[in-house]
Image (spheres, coloured by chain):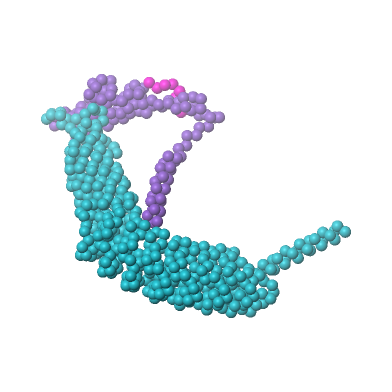
Amino acid sequence: MKMEKMKQLLLISILYLIFSMLTSCNSTYTDCENPDYSNCQTSVPSTGTMEIEVTINNENPKVPITIYIGNIENNQIEKLDTLIEGSKKIVLPVNQTYSVTAKYKKNGATIFAVDDDKIKASSKAVCDSTCWDVSNGSVNLKLKY
Amino acid sequence: MNRIFIKLLFSLIFVIFSGSIFAQDKNIDLLIAADKGDEEAVIKLLLDSADINARSVEDVTPLIYAAQNGHLNIVKILVYNKANIEAYSTQKTTALMAAAINNRTEVVDYLIKEGAKIQARDLYGANALLYAVAYNYFIMSDMLIFYGANPNSKSNDSISPLMIAAMNNDTAICNLLLRSGAKINDANQYGYTAMMYAVLNNSKEASKLLLDIGANTELSNNNSFTPLCMAAEKGNLEIAEMLIGKGAAVNIKVPNYKRPITIAQISNQTKLVKLLKQKGAKSLPFPIYNKVSFGIASSFNLDDILFGGELGLNDDKLKTSINFDFLTRLGYKRILENINDTVSYQFWEKRSLLSLNFEKRFNIRISKTQPNNKEQGILVGVKGYYTYGKYSGSTKKPESILFVAPQIGIFMKGAFTEMKIYYEYQDFKSYKVSPHRVNIALKFDIPLKNNMASSTKIDWL
């Protein structure tokens, strides 16, 4: 009897947890009588930014970077650049995953730091308009080793 | 004219209502007087036309109050004045039962002589004898039997007086009931006999008495548990010895748990296991996976941390378990992959691990009073791992490998929960990640086979 009760209690707790997770509030209410379009970008965005972080040091005062569309093995180069500061934002077309490499020298050897991210445009309906938003990308190509 | 009529009508309503209120007050006073044993007040109130069968909120009458508190004279006054002797409360407790529950022998004696029904049953189907036995009132039980109470009567949950006396280890009442015709091997709806109740409650004297008189040691309950199986589960060593001495079969087969020795092993009754082995019990060296476990797990060291879950099967017999784990790095970790002597790639690595593990637990008892469903001790085991992963920005992947990791640590287990912390040598060849790891798992255990002996708690007491 006790065992049965414990089982029931456990099951109820799990179901309650799942229910709470599924129904937890996420307020998306918009006042459509007085809509606020001040933060609404109505035109479809074509570009976004990719923030690239690199390590600048004595051995690597200038870091050459290569931006690829997709994986680096695809070899589809979108852009080449050289960074002289630790961080730079580069404008790139949206809805694409980019892989970025930074080339470093260390004790006579070459290290390619690799990372990727996606620049994505998304839309949502706000009353009778469609608002666009860009989720920009960032890659961390800092040298760790 | 109309005004006079209205005045008369109001006066009449007032008289009726006030009369009813005063009558109500008298009835309440009578209930209070009967409860307190105030004879004078009872007589006065009865003469003042208080309702002799007045009811409290719970339908208790003055007679029930007087009987319950042993006010014999008031009981006599009320009965003499034709109080309803069989009136009962909302729990269906009669005056006789109320007197029996409170060990008012003189009142019970009087009420029976005045015709109170001795076999009257309350809401739980319990009668005066069952209550007298339950509260260990020997004289009361003796008197009720003398007046014809049935020693084999049963409550709604099918409990007989002998079962209760055995449970209470009351050998005097057991003897009384058996002498009066109580059936020693009578079973209730769940198949439990008085012998089984004695065993489950570790009632040694009652067990000895029942065995001496000839209680059947081979009867089994609805879960096929014999008294010896119950003694094995509860760890009742002396009773187990008595049962074996009276010929209880040590190798009797019980579905799911096989034999009494297996039941003792699952219930962590080490002394019982020893005894049963001495008495020739056979124990096959196979595990019995009787619990399924699930929970969260983490594997970490200063370089890396992985999270995930664990699903497993626990064997409480040989204290082993088999677990399936999934662990994954929540984020990415920078690693360096050397292409040749002069070129290397620094990737962000995502890593996941799948593992199948076999563990053996060694219990360490901290104190003698520790409950048997609580365990702690050392665990040792071995895990077979498969690891896989990916690098961001590249189609290249870290090498997927199979490897074996030994583990050692500590564990704590309750009836439904367990926690383990253990060291593991987990070398999945990730760059600059130490293979020495600490693993933690918190899990819930759910029994797969629930056919251990039930609780012997009686709801109506």
Q: Nearer the viewer, residue B189 or B331?
A: B189
User: Residue B351 occupies which quadrant of the picture?
Assistant: top left
Q: Is residue B343 visible?
A: yes
Where's the C terminus of chain A, which quadrant?
top left
Give the quarter of the image for residue A78.
Answer: top left
Above or below, comparing residue B134 to residue A49 in the picture? below
Task: Note whether B308 is above or below B191 in the view shown.
Answer: above
Q: Give the magenta-colored segment's residue range.
A: A38-46
Residue at x-position 24% and y-position 39%:
B353
Please name whichever residue, A141 or B101, is drawn nearer the observer in this view of the structure.
B101
On screen, residue B98 versus residue A44, left or right, reads right
In the figure, the shade used to draw chain B is: cyan
The percent position of residue A90, horizontal first and vertical second, equals 31, 24
Q: Nearer the viewer, residue A93 or B154?
A: B154
Residue at 22% from the left image edge and 24% from the top image edge? A73
Residue at position x 29%, y 63% in the image = B228
Looking at the image, the residue that sits furthest to the left is B341
- The hue used for chain A is purple
Q: Position of residue B57 (x, y in %)?
A: 59, 64
The answer to whether B324 appears left or right of B120 in the picture is: left
